[in-house]
Image: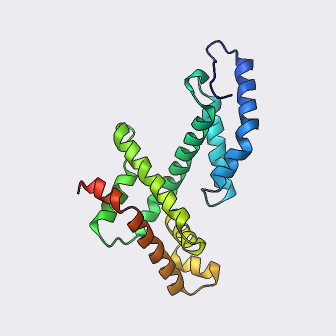
Amino acid sequence: MERVESASMSQTEKENFVSKTVENYGTKLMGFIRSKVRNSEDAEDILQEVWYQFSNLSNLSDIVNVSSWLYTVSRNKITDNYRKKQTENLEDFSYEDEGDLIIREFLMENNDENPELKMFQEQIWDEIFSALEELPETQRLVYTENELEGKTLQQIADEQNENLKTIISRKQYAVKHLRIKLNQLYKDLNND
């Protein structure tokens, strides 16, 4: 079911193909998405958006590899979800150097008209996700809840029954780790 020939596909055949694809990939995609987002509701919303986009394609034959297409669209939807949640939260973050501010502004720009910049923007988001996965769970949780979900550090401390200084320290370690991991991308963006 990798290459699709739908130029002569009837509506019924298309619906059957979409149903079969949902059946074959639904559980795997949900697991993939769920591992990348904070809660089940967001994962379900993202998966619904993926299936909606897939089912509304006018010409399924444009898809060379169904699996690859589904995972690419899923990653893009996850990125969009993070961006949407992060837009307000980034305003509260205190940056120590100009490089962080440049990256923050770049990540929030709409680069849909410039495919090269959009690709670079997506690469940064992929690197952020990858770096977050390397963090210990306690640091990743503090960072994502604060930066992506908009919780204050005090709220997180109260929820986890931890000292505020412990939560601040975990956040600082996470930010430091991200800075180290994204250093080359900072340089590329600054044209250093």
155 relative position to 189: left or right: right
168 relative position to 179: left or right: right
> Does 29 appear above or below 147?
above
Q: Return the x and y of residue 101 as percentages of the image width and height.
A: 32, 63
Q: Return the x and y of residue 157 as percentages of the image width and height.
A: 58, 81
> Does 103 appear above or below 62?
below
- In the foreground, 92 or 60: 60
Farthest residue in the left direction? Answer: 192
- In the foreground, 97 or 88: 97
| Quadrant in the picture for residue 182 | bottom left
> Does 88 appear above or below 138?
above
Quadrant of the rendering where the N terminus is positioned = top right
Number of disc labels: 0
Quadrant of the rendering where the C terminus is positioned = bottom left
> Residue at the spot x=51%, y=58% of the render?
130
25 relative position to 99: left or right: right
Color encoding of the figure: rainbow
Is residue 149 at least partly visible in the picture? no
Q: Return the x and y of residue 90 as percentages of the image width and height.
A: 42, 64
Q: Return the x and y of residue 100 as percentages of the image width and height.
A: 34, 64
Is residue 157 at least partly visible in the picture? yes
> Residue at the spot x=64%, y=35% of the render?
52
> Does 97 appear above or below 18?
below
> Residue at the spot x=70%, y=15% of the render?
10
| Quadrant in the picture for residue 94 | bottom left
Farthest residue in the top direction? Answer: 8
